Image (cartoon, rainbow, N blue to C red):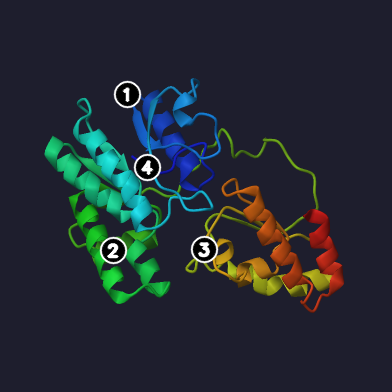
Amino acid sequence: MSRIFAPEPAAAAPRLAAVAQALTDAGAEVTVITTTVPGMTGGPETDDSAPYDVRCVPALRDRDGYIRGYVNYMSFDIPAFFRLVFSKRFDAVIVEPPPTTGVFIRAAAWLRRTPYLFYAADVWSEAADVAGTPKVMVSVVRAFEDWAYRGAARVLSMSASVSRRVSRSASGARVETVGNGYDSTVFRPDGPRIERSPCPLYAGTASEVHGAGVFVDAMPLLLTKHPEDKLVFIGQGADWSVGEDVSDIAAAMIEVFSAQGSSARRLELAERTRQRLSLQSVGARVADAVGAVI
């Protein structure tokens, strides 16, 4: 049960696909409940090569094509809840955040008298607090999160530090550190290569709590010594995709890869980035490099 799944470009998507594949290989009958990927003529359920069943439910997305924010999360959670309640018999459910999904699935699992396992890649309430979210909302997120943790047969933690924080926040939760897996059939050392000069690369969500701005802070100094280098961001995040002004994450960005959002939106971001770069101390040399990429 996840609002994102392969082939959607998100960090969790290939991991979840690998889990579904591994369970299928072990003899389990797997059904994935997720959403349709925007911009595709069909959706993940049209992939005939997948050995597991994929069912898509509608969900609201923002203008960049992401399911982000409480209303958007609920647009997935509610139909997913009813899908689960009225589905055929199942032995267990694996649930991907956000915490609202965990709350709905705990309720559905209770109605069906079936255990669920909840992934914890991070502690959302802590991230919301660091991002400056109003305290009342942080308290609500923490309550949702803790309730989902405590009801799970296992909380599958991505790291030892997350395990400690979950155990501290939700006493009694059964936490197991499993690590952050990946699809080794795609990400492998003998895979296809792109011949290019070395470059700093940030892959994943670049939100207020991830610290991706350190690349931007270092980039002007790097460009004075290596003007041919390119800072590459792959993914999405509030630090460079929203707001009236292009944020610091975008200020020294040269290449951005995001499969979501309209071409017009990406071009707008690139142009504003180029304009900001032209004001940097590295001068027109960097701006020309960005213009060439655009």
Q: What is the spatial separation of the Cα atoms under label 4 and label 1, in whole angstroms?
A: 17 Å
Three-letter code, disc 2: Val
**Is disc 1 in contact with disc 3, using a CB cutoff of under 8 Å?**
no
**In front of the other: label 4 or label 3?**
3
Which numbered disc covers residue 29?
1
- In the rendered view, would you say 45 is above or below 187? above
Q: What is the spatial separation of the Cα atoms under label 2 and label 4, in whole angstroms?
A: 18 Å
In which quadrant of the rendered image does the N terminus lie? top left
Question: Going from the N terminus, do you reach mark 4 or mark 3 first?
Answer: 4
Question: Going from the N terminus, do you reach mark 2 or mark 1 first?
Answer: 1
Q: Which residue is mark 4?
A: 2
* Residue 85 location (% of width, % of height): 19, 35
Count neighbours of disc 1 (C-alpha within 10 A) and say few if under 14, some if 14 to 19, many if 20 or more: some
Q: What is the spatial separation of the Cα atoms under label 3 and label 2, in whole angstroms?
A: 19 Å
Residue at image coords 35%, 46%: 96
Question: Going from the N terminus, do you reach mark 3 or mark 2 first?
Answer: 2
Q: Which residue is mark 3?
A: 238
Q: Which residue is mark 2?
A: 141
